[in-house]
Image (cartoon, helix red, strand yellow):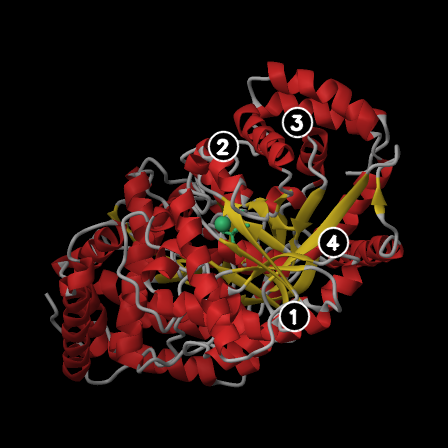
């Protein structure tokens, strides 16, 4: 089948020369079609490029009527060329006029041709155009010729992606590649960010396309595949995952692809058409992506990510890890685009240059999103296809308020956003004027607004946002950004800095809450089937008491002579609180024994995040000083709905009557036992949900710093007595969160409460 192998390589070499010539874009393209036609012994060679208005425009031809160039165009799906673009598959036909999709364009003079071969021009699975050859004789093109055309199309993809052809389009229209796009998603963190795309996992860019020695390239490919297979087998054989779970399923899918003979065969064929091993991997990856993206089978579409990961691994093996972005070279206005990412990975970028975050997946209470919100990074999640349509360096706007992204925005759009940014800055200024004003409702009830924090960069916000202190200090964030386990003195330093920066305002520290989706690079935890319900938070702390006691000691030292408030996360039964308290008392005894100064006052609390505790409230409240409700976890466990699962986000309302009733009952119990109850989950920072919490009787809320302004302004407008009067009845009768939402929205409108 391989026959004369020198042909395609000679063509590729000539194309490379043509690409390098200092000539104008049209001439270059004309030379390219002439070269292809000659090499394929075809009378016609034409290039169609996809425009932003979804038309495939004839950009160059050898053989068809030259006056049709930049005049003739076909819609995607129309004619043979349109058909190839919509299917992302080649068409190899004798007597093309008999094909049902054939349409006749008189201006081209196409009628005389009896053989047709067209291939899609693809980049990362995206259609950029179509390349066609035609012959007068009736014939079918060989597999080898199809292969050579696909390889040639890859060179054309590079030319189109370089942007050189943009100015040639016949109409005023732009190329599809540069098309402005607007994609909607789900708002995860408010705010507007203007900047440039940084792909979190940059596509490995293959620059060396053409190889002279196919045998050597085949050997390189084989060696890389061998290493790839070994590494996947290795991962699968590791003890900690051999028991199964989602992680294992993904690796099984990797293995399936890694051993797929069709995949390897297609890559070898691409090598024999003249490509380097890495260019062959990329070409086959692009074809496969295009096909999987068009598949209606959800299983196949989901596997696309696995396949992509594997192909990228193979590319890295071939290219020795080149291609990943050096974070020192981040643009000053980076907008990170990722399928999904961990909180620690986001922190790795450094706050200074981050203007926004776009996730294909993500859920509002996942930790990466909480961190983004804490850092004030506008974030839109669930943006389908974001990674495919964004190119590194593209201009982009993230609109966290309207849950949209604007890719390659037109100047008008950009100008209007610049205005909005100014307007927002003005609003923030208004909020900052409220900074020193206490949050008192219209009818005189005082509400205490605290801030959630976790990093030293958060601290200036306490004053800036006008918080009354820190209601939740997530100590694990320090651990998540560290490269090795922070020692006791390092921890102490951070805790002391927090207490210093807050200047006597109350700070509630939470003991280490790792595990689940909060991973520490240096603490290898065995993968779990249900990590959110696994070995995390206080469970891990009690099983590794050395770890918890080190943290307690660091906190006690840092708070010497001051007030220390500490709470334990994920308490499921009161015994766990007792056990943690006992460890803490041992640390105090240690302090006393060694004559260290103690805090002047200590308060211990528990986070209510696990529903079982709702049925042990009397026992719980009789033994602690305060309770803070972690509604993110409590909601996920009450609703049995993974907080990080994209498909479930928004399915169960945080205003659902069952959930709000539970919150109401906790507060009643708190009053009975004289134990203060606060809310520190994300709902405390959403004006509508916070209205519900106030109506239930909550008076202390802790939220991300950017929410304090909006919540305070809501509180100042709120006639709380009137709301409370009706809210009890609404809650007693409602059977859905939507009813409660409608009631609260109506109330806010009627009373001019700013939301
Ligand atoms: C919560 O679960 O609501 C909470 C505040 O803790 P985290 O979001 O850190 O799990
Ligand atoms: Mg929690």
Disc ID at residue 741: 3
Residue 287 horizontal/vertical position (percent): 31, 57
Q: Observer-nearest residue: 187 or 704? A: 704
Quadrant for the N terminus in the image? bottom left
Mark nearer the viewer, 3 or 1: 1
Q: Which residue is mark 1?
A: 498
Disc ID at residue 413: 4
Cα–Cα gap, marks 3 and 1:
37 Å
Disc ID at residue 651: 2
Residue 223 horizontal/vertical position (percent): 15, 78
Q: Observer-nearest residue: 440 or 4? A: 440
Among the two numbered marks 4 and 2 on one chain, the one whose residue lies closer to the N terminus: 4
Confirm whether residue 651 shows in the render: yes
Cα–Cα gap, marks 4 and 2:
32 Å
Among the two numbered marks 4 and 3 on one chain, the one whose residue lies closer to the N terminus: 4
Q: Observer-nearest residue: 449 or 254? A: 449
Task: Describe residue 569's horizontal placement relative to residue 562 as left or right.
Answer: left
Residue 186 horizontal/vertical position (percent): 57, 44
Q: For disc 2, does the CB lie below 8 Å from ligand 1? A: no
> SS at mark 2?
loop
Cα–Cα gap, marks 4 and 3:
32 Å
> SS at mark 1?
helix
Give the residue displayed 68% in from the left and 15% down from the top. Answer: 729
Task: Describe residue 45's horizontal placement relative to residue 349 as left or right.
Answer: left
Mark nearer the viewer, 1 or 4: 1
Among the two numbered marks 3 and 1 on one chain, the one whose residue lies closer to the N terminus: 1
Quadrant for the C terminus in the image? top right
Residue 233 horizontal/vertical position (percent): 14, 65
Cα–Cα gap, marks 3 and 2:
14 Å
């Amino acid at each position: 089948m391989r026959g004369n192998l020198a042909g395609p390589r000679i063509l590729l070499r000539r194309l490379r020369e043509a690409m390098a010539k200092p000539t104008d874009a049209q001439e270059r393209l004309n030379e390219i079609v002439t070269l292809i036609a000659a090499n394929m012994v075809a009378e016609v060679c034409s290039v169609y490029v996809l425009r932003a208005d979804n038309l495939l425009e004839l950009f160059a031809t050898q053989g068809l009527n030259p006056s049709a160039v930049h005049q003739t165009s076909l819609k995607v799906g129309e004619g043979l060329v349109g058909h190839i673009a919509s299917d992302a598959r080649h068409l190899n036909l004798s007597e093309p006029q008999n094909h049902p999709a054939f349409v006749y364009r008189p201006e081209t003079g196409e009628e005389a041709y009896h053989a047709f071969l067209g291939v899609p021009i693809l980049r990362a699975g995206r259609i950029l155009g179509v390349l066609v050859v035609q012959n007068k004789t009736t014939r079918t093109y060989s597999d080898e010729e199809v292969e050579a055309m696909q390889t040639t199309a890859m060179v054309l993809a590079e030319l189109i992606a370089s942007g050189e052809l943009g100015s040639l389009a016949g109409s005023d229209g732009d190329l599809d590649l540069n098309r402005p796009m607007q994609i909607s998603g789900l708002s995860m963190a408010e705010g507007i960010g203007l900047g440039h795309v940084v792909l979190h996992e940059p596509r490995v860019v293959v620059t060396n396309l053409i190889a002279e020695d196919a045998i050597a390239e085949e050997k390189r490919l084989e060696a890389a595949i061998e290493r790839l297979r070994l590494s996947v087998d290795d991962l699968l054989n590791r003890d900690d995952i051999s028991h199964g779970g989602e992680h294992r399923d993904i690796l099984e899918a990797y293995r399936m692809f890694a051993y797929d003979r069709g995949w390897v065969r297609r890559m070898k064929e691409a090598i024999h058409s003249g490509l380097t091993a890495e260019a062959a991997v990329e070409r086959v990856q692009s074809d496969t992506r295009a096909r999987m993206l068009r598949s209606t089978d959800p299983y196949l579409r989901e596997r696309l990510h696995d396949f992509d990961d594997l192909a990228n691994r193979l590319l890295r093996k071939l290219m020795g890890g080149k291609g990943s972005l050096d974070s020192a070279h981040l643009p000053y206005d980076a907008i990170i685009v990722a399928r999904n990412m961990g909180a620690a990975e986001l922190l790795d970028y450094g706050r200074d240059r981050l203007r926004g975050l776009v996730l294909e997946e993500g859920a509002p209470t996942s930790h990466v999103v909480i961190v983004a919100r804490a850092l004030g990074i506008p974030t839109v999640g669930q943006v389908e296809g974001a990674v495919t349509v964004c190119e590194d360096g593209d201009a982009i706007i993230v609109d966290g308020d309207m849950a949209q992204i604007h890719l390659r925005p037109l100047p008008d759009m950009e100008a209007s956003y610049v205005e909005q940014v100014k307007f927002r800055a003005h609003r923030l200024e208004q909020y900052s004027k409220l900074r020193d004003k206490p949050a008192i409702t219209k009818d005189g009830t005082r509400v205490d607004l605290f801030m959630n924090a976790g990093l030293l960069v958060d601290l200036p916000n306490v004053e800036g946002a006008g918080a009354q202190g820190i209601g939740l200090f997530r100590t694990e964030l320090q651990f998540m950004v560290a490269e090795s386990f922070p020692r006791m003195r390092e921890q102490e330093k951070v805790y002391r800095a927090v207490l210093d920066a807050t200047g006597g305002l109350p700070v509630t520290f939470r003991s280490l809450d790792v595990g689940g989706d909060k991973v520490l690079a240096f603490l290898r935890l065995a993968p779990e089937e249900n990590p959110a319900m696994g070995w995390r938070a206080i469970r891990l702390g009690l099983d590794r008491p050395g770890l918890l006691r080190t943290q307690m000691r660091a906190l006690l030292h840092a708070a010497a002579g001051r007030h220390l408030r500490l709470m334990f996360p994920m308490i499921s039964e009161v015994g766990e609180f007792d056990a943690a308290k006992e460890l803490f008392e041992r640390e105090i005894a240690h302090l006393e024994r060694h004559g260290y100064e103690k805090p002047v006052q200590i308060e211990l609390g528990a986070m209510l995040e696990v529903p079982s505790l709702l049925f042990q409230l009397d026992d719980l409240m009789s033994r602690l000083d305060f309770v803070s409700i972690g509604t993110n976890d409590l909601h996920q466990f009450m609703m049995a709905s993974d907080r990080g699962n994209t498909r479930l986000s928004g399915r169960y309302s945080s205003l659902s009557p069952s959930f709000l009733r539970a919150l109401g009952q906790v507060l009643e119990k708190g009053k009975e036992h004289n134990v203060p109850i606060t809310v520190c989950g994300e709902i405390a920072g959403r004006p509508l949900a916070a209205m519900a919490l106030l109506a239930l009787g909550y008076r202390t809320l802790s939220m991300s710093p950017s929410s304090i302004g909006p919540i305070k302004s809501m509180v100042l407008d709120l006639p709380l007595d009137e709301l409370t009067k009706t809210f009890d009845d609404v809650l007693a009768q409602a059977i859905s969160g939507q009813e409660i939402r409608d009631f609260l929205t109506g109330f806010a409108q009627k009373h001019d409460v700013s939301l």
